[in-house]
Image (cartoon, rainbow, N blue to C red):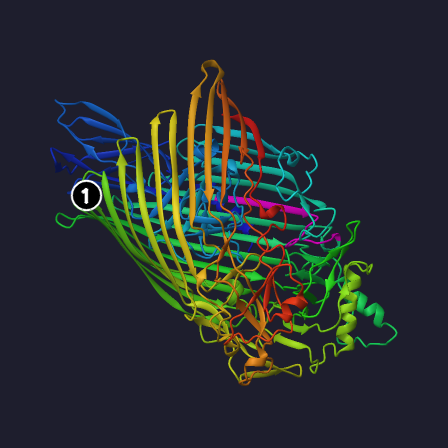
Amino acid sequence: MKVTQRFVFLVAVLLLVAGSAFGQGTTGSLNGTVTHEGAPLPGVTITISSPSLIGTRVGVSNVNGDYNFPALPPGDYTVKFEMEGMGTVTKTIKVGLAKTERVNALMQLSAVADVITVTAAAPAVLETTEVQSNYEAEMIEDLPIGRTVQNTVQLAPGVTGSATAIVVSGAYAYDTLYLVNGAVTNENVRGQTDNLYIEDAIQETSIITGSVSAEYGRFTGGVVSAITKSGGNEFSGSFRDSFTNPSWDKTTDFGEPQQDSVTDEVYEATLGGRIIRDRLWFFGAGRDAEQTFPGFFINGGANPLGAQPRPATIQTDERYEVKLTGQVTPKHSLVGSYLSYEVDQTPHCAFGCWDINTMDIDGRQLPREMITAQYNGILTSNFLIEAGYSTRDLVFENSGGNYRSTTDPFNVVPGSANFESQIRDLALGTWAYDYTVAGGAWGAPIFCGVCDPESRENEYYLLKGTYYLATAGAGTHNIVAGYENFAESRFANNYQSGSNFDIYVYSTPPEYEDDGTFRPILNYGDVLRYVPIGLLSKGSDFVTESFFINDKWDLGSKWSFNIGFRYDANDGQDSAGKPISDDSNTSPRLSVIYDINGDGRFRVNASYSRYVSRIQETIGGAAGGGNPSYFGYYYTGDQIGGRGTGMGSFDVITEMFRWFYENGGLSPDNPFLVFAVVPGANTRFDGSLKSPNVDEFTIGFGTQIGSKGFVRFDYIDKDWQDFYSVETSPNDQVVVAGSLLDVRTTTNNNDVEKTYQGLSVQANYRLTDRFNIGGNYTWSEQRGNEVGETTGGGPGSSAVNLYREYKAYARNNPVGFLPNDQEHKARIWVSYDQPLGMFGNLNFSLLERFDSGAPYSAAGNVNVSNYVTNPGYATPPTSAFYYFSDRGEFRFEDATATDLALNWELPIKKVNIFVQGELINAFNEQAQVGGSSSIAVISGVTFNPFTDTPQECPAGTATATCRANGQVWRKATNFGQATGAASYQLPLTYRFSAGIRF
């Protein structure tokens, strides 16, 4: 996408036509009812104004006394009610992002009152059935949390997971819709939001976790929308220097060394104002950072010298944003923005490194661009139209190792003159990933940095209209209808390594010499994979076209309904250009609010919704084009490497290649070939792939606490359908390169399950103008037997029907607590302002956090081949997964933390100087929140998983003893224990920043 050229064109249009307008997910709305002596009062003129709004907006109350202002830029508004013979009423209200605010007015005869000025009404969180939280930049600025969108989202109820894998209302981490200035910022593969913003530019962030309007789609979790500032008639700006140093921070109880003293600084600057007063505004922001990310080589607790530091990654991060807001006429507005974001990471370690060889010393580059454009037009007093466009690009450059093996893997002959050099050449481009203790790789860097760069893009169009209809007997209707077109594409020749080989280590963890020298091990049961790309990518293309209509219907003073319907149609082509999805689905959205007394004090709400996800690129794009084939070879030789052998990573891998080629190599007759996947050859799609979807029910209650606070309770129940699935069937095979392979079909099924239940409460109370307390609590439960994603790879498919005959026992895939289950989460915050007279203002903020422990299980692969008669597979599995415990039976520790912030601000004329200090985990609490779940299946013990009950061997018992006792499995000695510093919550951490605002 030529985003730069498109942005230049949009800027040119704005400058020529040079009120604020925004598209989907960037505005709020304001409505209310005007009454006199208890009866509706039509004909009242309502005028609204705001520093966020170019000009003013004017409306007139209808026959029911109602009025409505849609598509308003978030900000502080003054609402004036005027009518001849009546006293003028003026109210103030803060319109939130993606929220509907309500301001009612009671008019009196002018003889009674000339002017009444009050400050607004019921909290907006009570005005809607949507389970929603809004956080303004000023609040996030005061609290001791990071100012990123991800950190803000984690503050909300119903949100769990880490900042790199955020889970909303029990959905998969990849399945929440993220918007910044109306643009979709989800990264194509793993689905998390990209950092397409500058922290000091953010104005407000909205998080909707339930009962979502039909205006939003392509998710099963929730909707996160952030908006950046837009400038104004008055000039304003800021400059900030934020700095941290790992040597100031505490270490965890794991005992990792204290890191060296390196002060990292992040510079941010913003500037906004007018080009033409009440006509054309501008806003710009920039961010420049060079940060050092120290790390440690993985050791699994076995290095006698403890965790050893690896070369620190130096990450440079440069971002800038330009935004223009213009009013063509008083009723027609345009907004355009451009953001550039460039990252360099040198050196780079993907997915954890055991030794220096696995680090990409030359680093990688990740340039990104995003543009947005919106139009807003008021055609009549009750009809408004909006149009929007956005696009986003991400490119991976030099991502992976720089060594490219030149050996033809089909032309390696044992005993030939160049055999030794050939297997060494292949070894230098091959990595091994450890599944025995703590994950991470050793050997060559993961991926190929000297192969093709990868690009990930999306493009989005929106057209919608809003019609406000008032009837004498059937209330008022705020009807929104629209069309969306969302396209997502990826060009990637996904070379896994520089040799087209990699190794998965399942048997024996690495060892160390007494001096700490790393000694990797390959052993019986490990798998060497040949991963060539047979067909280069043409680029995938997944388009979702959507139509939606939503009616917000207010009936009298007690009833309010939200009736919506959405239709989503997929048109997906894989990376080979083949169509794989032309599916469609509908999403009804129905909700109701009942105001018990008709005064906004006590409200009950309920809803039913269906949400339909988009087709995930890693599932739908998994065809031949650009995707590697996988040929797995089961190693049956003696142990290679280990303590006392003197063998390094590449020595061990070289010996693996020696065994491989001396036992058949890539010959179709190699007896150790245990699986083969050839995208586009023995993989296919069964008809049209469907989008997974979820049904949701909610019920809630909310009430005001006097005029200063509120409390709201919501219960959410969700049940997913149409899971992605990979399946095989007996006697369904193809011949590829002389090998008979089982066909693997990607489809949808409902043979697995995933459910979520959550009860949340959120509350806020302002004791005084200077003292505010708020927070939320969530109880939740995620159960099922479909995990559906991995931390590093994103979306995944169910394998329950992959060689199903070999898995037809109860403990293969039982229902239980899923990995993202978190039973309890609480966030409570307090903020207090202390004026210091001529010395400015001092704000003290406290955030108390509680997170219950994550579940884990005791499970491993057991032999199944001896207990199943092959029904007709070419390469049936020899082993399958077995849960020796209940799924999620064990839990890591609960974590609590107290975070503190001190914010001092000193005004000097028109400039405010500020200094901020934060203590994260101020009391240095040390909960173990992760660790090892490793177990060993004892070889040589007869165990039929279809009929037998396995006996556990005590941890630490000799294998021979376990075998003699007929005991099938044994927990690792470090089962449930920490494997590194990352197994603990973040220890005491200091953060500081200083700067100016004007």
Q: Quadrant of residue 695?
A: bottom left
Residue range corresponding to the magenta coloring: 337-356
Q: Amino acid at mark 1?
A: Ile
- Say whether residue 837 is visible: yes
Image quadrant of residue 556? Answer: top left
Task: Please tell me which residue lies in front, 728 or 1.
Answer: 728
Residue at 70% in and 67% down? 500
Q: Residues within 10 Å of mark 1 (few under 14, many from 20)?
A: some
Q: Give the answer, above or below, for where 998 lies relative to 556.
A: above
Q: Position of residue 142 (x, y in %)?
A: 47, 31
What secondary structure is found at the residue carrying circle 1?
Answer: loop
Q: Is residue 406 visible?
A: no
Please say if 110 is above or below 839. below
Q: Residue at x 44, y 73 (%)?
A: 688
Q: Is residue 323 above or below residue 623?
A: above
Task: Residue 704: say if magenta.
Answer: no
Tell me if 148 is positioned left or right of 483 in this view.
right
